[in-house]
């Protein structure tokens, strides 16, 4: 299995960043015509973001299953700029969702959470798996004696 880590690594990123969790919930699976457009919108957005220049601010993403995704952004401003850009994939998908579900919000649900992370106020560890999450969106470093525990990693990132 190529890409599987044979050691422990941690994520490293300079400066503040944003963690954006987004997902959907299919409440009425028999209404395929209702939720299928929602399912189809995210791959188009991810493809667009993967091809976008670094200035867009999307650092990367990881899937947390079929209906949940975590994205990493350089700033909230960058995330909001993308979400509100009328010439990007998100805006028309959002307008379409609101139009379709004005009177049928119970068919499919969507949610998102945004976390603004200050520099150094995070920790992570990855072992026995491919690079994932923040380590795949930013950079990774081997866990050393000075960063063996979660508390140590928080300290080595600048937090106490």
Image: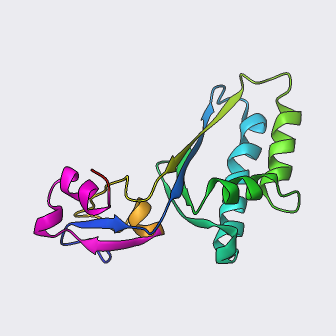
Using the image, determine if residue 56 lies above or below residue 42: below
Task: From the viewer's side, name the closer residue of 63 and 85.
Answer: 85
Residue 92, given in percent of the width and then of the height, sits at 86, 51
Residue 5 x, y percent position in the rendering: 25, 71
Image coords of residue 83 (percent x, y): 75, 53
Quadrant placement of the N terminus: bottom left
Give whichever of 90, 143 is nearer the camera. Answer: 143
Q: Quadrant of residue 133?
A: bottom left
- Name the residue at 61% across, 58% down: 75
Q: Is residue 127 above or below residue 36?
A: below
**Which residue lies at the image location 23% right of the left edge and 63% below the top edge?**
127
The question of residue 148 being in magenta is answered with: yes
- Tell me the residue at 78%/37% (across/down): 33
For this rendering, which residue is in front, 54 or 17?
A: 17
Is residue 101 found left or right of 140 in the rendered image? right
- Total marks drawn? 0
User: Which contiguous range is marked in magenta?
Assistant: 138-158
State left or right for residue 80 relative to residue 102: left
- Residue 20 seen from this side: yes
Q: Is residue 66 visible?
A: no
Does the magenta run of residues contain 29?
A: no
Q: How is the image coloured?
A: rainbow
Q: Residue at x 83, y 58 (%)?
A: 85
Point out residue 56 in the picture as x, y percentages from the top left corner.
69, 69
Q: Using the image as rendered, state which of residue 160 and residue 1 is in the foreground.
A: 160
Of all residues, the one furthest to the left in this rendering is: 145
């Amino acid at each position: 299995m190529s890409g599987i880590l044979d050691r422990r690594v941690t994520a490293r990123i300079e400066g503040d960043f944003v963690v954006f969790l987004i997902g959907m919930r299919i409440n009425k699976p028999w209404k395929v015509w209702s939720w299928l457009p929602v399912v189809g919108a995210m791959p188009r957005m991810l493809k667009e973001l993967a091809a976008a220049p670094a200035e867009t601010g999307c650092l990367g993403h990881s899937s947390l299953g079929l209906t949940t995704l975590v994205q990493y952004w350089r700033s909230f401003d960058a995330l909001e700029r993308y979400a509100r850009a009328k010439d990007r994939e998100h805006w028309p998908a959002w307008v379409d969702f609101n139009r379709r579900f004005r009177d049928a919000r119970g068919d499919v649900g969507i949610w998102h959470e945004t976390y603004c992370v200050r520099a150094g106020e995070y920790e992570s560890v990855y072992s026995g798996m491919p690079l994932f999450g923040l380590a795949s969106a930013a950079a990774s470093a081997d866990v050393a004696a000075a960063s063996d525990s979660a508390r140590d990693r928080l300290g080595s990132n600048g937090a106490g």
